[in-house]
Image (cartoon, grey):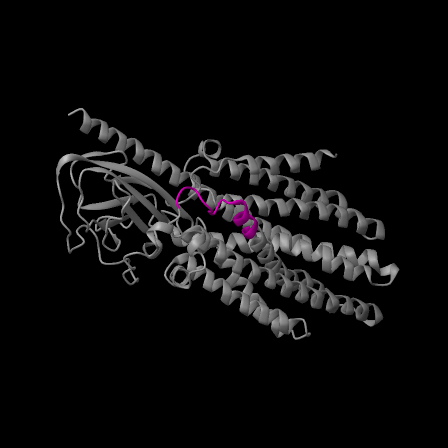
Amino acid sequence: MSTRKAVIIALAAFVLAIPSVADAHAMLKRSLPASGAHLGAAPREIRLDFTEEPELSVSRIDLRGPDGSVVRLAPLGVATDSRRSIVATIRGALGAGTYTVTWLVAGTDGHASRGRFVFTIAPGAADVAATGGEAGASASAPGQAQPPASHHNAVSMPEGEGFGADSAAYVAIRWLLYTGLFIVIGAVAFRYAVLGVLARREQHLEGRKAHAESSMLTSARDRAAVLGLWATATVAAAAVLRLIAQSYAMHGSEDAWNATFVSTMVARTVWGWGWLLQAAGVAVAATGFSIARRGARSGWAVAALGALILALTPALSGHAASAPRFTPFAVLADWLHVIGAGGWLGSLLMLLVVGIPAALRLEEAARGRAVADFVNAFSPTALVFAGLAASTGVFAAWLHLGTIPALWQTAYGRTLLVKLGVLSLVAGTGAYNWLRVKPSLGDIEGAVRIRRSATVELAVGVLVLVVTAVLVAKPTAVDVAAMTTTAATSSAHQTSELTR
């Protein structure tokens, strides 16, 4: 086994071995009543404070009495003093005994978080009669109708870790989505950047040679459109699977196919709006590629619009949408990051499976030179897109890490380090192609060498997508730090209360 392959396998194993504890993003900071609290008076409401603003329309709280019976709660509301807190007024009467609270929420990025805790009411505590109001809570979340009193059947409400954003199946679905998305973006980048450069060079040529190269470009353009259409179909399939997976994560296996719950999730959450935008992007891109594969150049403009729409959608279901600060810039940076990465790795795939094969179908004497032309046109394209991906990636890392030690102290940081390690392999392979292989192009032997080394570069790029699919399911270091600080403060406060 070569050293390069051994390194790739080791990095992949490290990614899979990273602990997935607390991978939900909207993490519980504190609760009232507190977990394990012993109360001398029955509470009037349940309040949960989270590290980020939860989606009210898909959040729920279940309260069970000492005998396991359901205690009636008012519809959930948002606390008047914090958009990151949800409140449910207790409408049922409470007696002495131990009560269990089970909750499930999703952050703006759509990642589900669930948990449970208990509190005990001491014998002789004052009882609370049913109340009609919702003290301490607003009527509804901004721009949303009041959610139903019981969004889910309390008996079937998911418990424990369950299926979530960090599950292997969900990671695989995201990887499939990213792969299709990158190919869609790469097809458009290849058409306008690589083939565009070659077409302009061709305008200075005359005669039979120019005609042969024109046929080569036409063939490459048409094949890129076909591949782009297949990639769009892949994105569509992944989007359907992603919707199913999200419903399983949010609603549990019993209610995953409930049309009411699914429609609420799609229509009333940022994650759902992103999914609808993704569906629209698929429709636009598919239309454009379908027109382009029939030879109509106008189809490429439509496909480019679809690619730009699709590139925005990961930001609406990832860390960018739930960033605690600079959220608009985080979304913009994520959008540009996807465009940069897709334009880089996606156009590399197009070079390998569309450009070089088109060149090798020419007369033998022209093949080596044609491959060199493709590579020379691709190189500046790759540099621009890779630079865009790198610069926006640095901004995202600064935003989500908070501190440098978070790189090795948090699961998010360690996964990011793995991604950087894999990216260094991609960059190293690309540099080798640029410095050693590219200068030797011009004959068929050079074409074989560039094809082999570029294939290795692309294979490592696939691993980058795997790591990315894992990374977006990790809570950011900033979120973990916020939860840790609040937990310490809450613990100190409870200790102070007990010692009074």
Q: Quadrant of residue 141?
A: bottom left
Residue 264's place in the image compared with 24, above or below, is below
Between 230 and 418, which is closer to the camera in this rendering?
230
**Which region is colored magenta?**
159-174
Q: Quadrant of residue 359?
A: bottom right
Between 156 and 371, which is closer to the camera in this rendering?
156
Please provide percent x and percent y for residue 240: 52, 60
Residue 137 visible to the viewer: yes
Residue 134's place in the image compared with 47, above or below, is below
Q: Is residue 187 left or right of residue 218?
A: left
Q: Is residue 13 left or right of residue 488?
A: right
Residue 301 visible to the viewer: no
Q: Is residue 169 magenta?
A: yes
Q: Is residue 192 left or right of residue 335?
A: right
Please provide percent x and percent y for residue 427: 64, 43
Image quadrant containing the N terminus: top right
